[in-house]
Amino acid sequence: MSFLKLSEVSYSYPNGFEATQKVSMEFQLGEAVAIIGQNGAGKTTTVKLMNGLLRPTKGEVLIDGKSTNVFTAAQMSKHVGYVFQNPDDQIFQETIEKEIAFGPKSQKLAVSVIKKKVKEAAETCGLTEVLNEHPYNLSYSKRKFITIAAIIAMDPEVIVLDEPTAGQDRESTELLGRIIKELSAKNKAVITITHDMEFVVKEFQRVLVFADKQLRKEGTPREVFWDESLLTLSGLKQPYICQLAKALEFKNILTMEELGKKVLGHEKNSD
């Protein structure tokens, strides 16, 4: 059974604007899933329905088979952790250690357990050497890892990352990939909203595509990025490798390795 399930979920803001329409999706523990789509497609609103920041106007959200209608927002946060796109919307403590420890402390865990969780989360996110620093002594991109560590320390079954690669360099993006793999290996469901198509190809096997407030397709990166009608509908572009392959008149290419083999094979056949 899926751990997290959205069934025909819609959400309208108090002013009447409908942000999502009849969205149905399921998530298993231990999987990493990417959600893509243009701004305004309904992605962020949908994930905020997963952890109680918003409540569905229609439909139902289930966590481990139970409707979220019976949970408070605090109770839901124990199951679904949400990492904001802007870390400055989340950080409020005077040291990185206190920021990471805040969630476990609010869960009233033993001091020894809190210390262990802070240590492990800091190690995962590359923050061990800066725990006594003020969060704003770190760069914007590094502050994103503070907020990720803070959610990891709370140990929810589901972790939602909102645009984690925005503003990140190659080294930080690779660290994000390792974090996602580590969390999945620990049987966490990791749901990532991103506009970084190269990151999607590299790190995810399941992709959900949003357009016009609805979920339009679920598939592998190959199924998504070579569906030209879907890309047109959703206003998305192929990853660079796919664009290059298309320019060379190759199809269904997803990586540089695949493209290299195709080019070599084409040259041999031409000899």
Image (cartoon, rainbow, N blue to C red):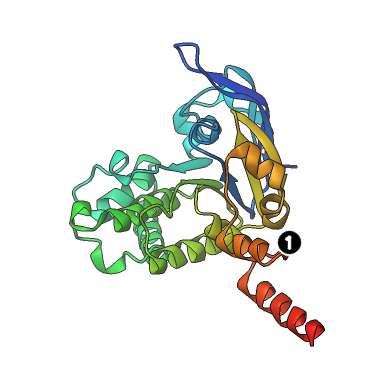
Which residue occupies 32% across, 41% down?
A: 90
Instruction: Please indicate whether residue 142 sits to the left or right of residue 232 in the image.
Output: left
Q: Tell me if I can see residue 185 in this picture.
A: no
Quadrant location, the C terminus: bottom right
Residue 79, horizontal then vertical, whole percent: 53, 40
Going by the numbered disc 1, the residue's amino acid type is: Asn
Instruction: Please indicate whether residue 169 sits to the left or right of residue 69 in the image.
Output: left
**Quadrant of residue 21 within the rendered picture:** top right
Residue 188, horizontal then vertical, whole percent: 58, 53
Instruction: Please indicate whether residue 201 sits to the left or right of residue 163 in the image.
Output: right
Circle 1 residue: 252
Question: Which residue occupies the extreme top position in the image?
Answer: 15
243 relative to 10, above or below: below
Which residue occupies 45% across, 47% down?
A: 163
Which residue occupies 43% across, 52% down?
A: 164
Towards the viewer: 71 or 126: 126
Instruction: Please indicate whether residue 175 sits to the left or right of residue 93 in the image.
Output: right
39 relative to 125, above or below: above
Quadrant location, the N terminus: top right
Q: Tell me if I can see residue 251 in this picture.
A: yes
Towards the viewer: 59 or 17: 17
75 relative to 137, above or below: above
Q: Give the SS element for disc 1.
A: loop
224 relative to 15, above or below: below
Question: Which residue occupies the extreme bottom position in the image?
Answer: 271
Which residue occupies 40% across, 52% down?
A: 166
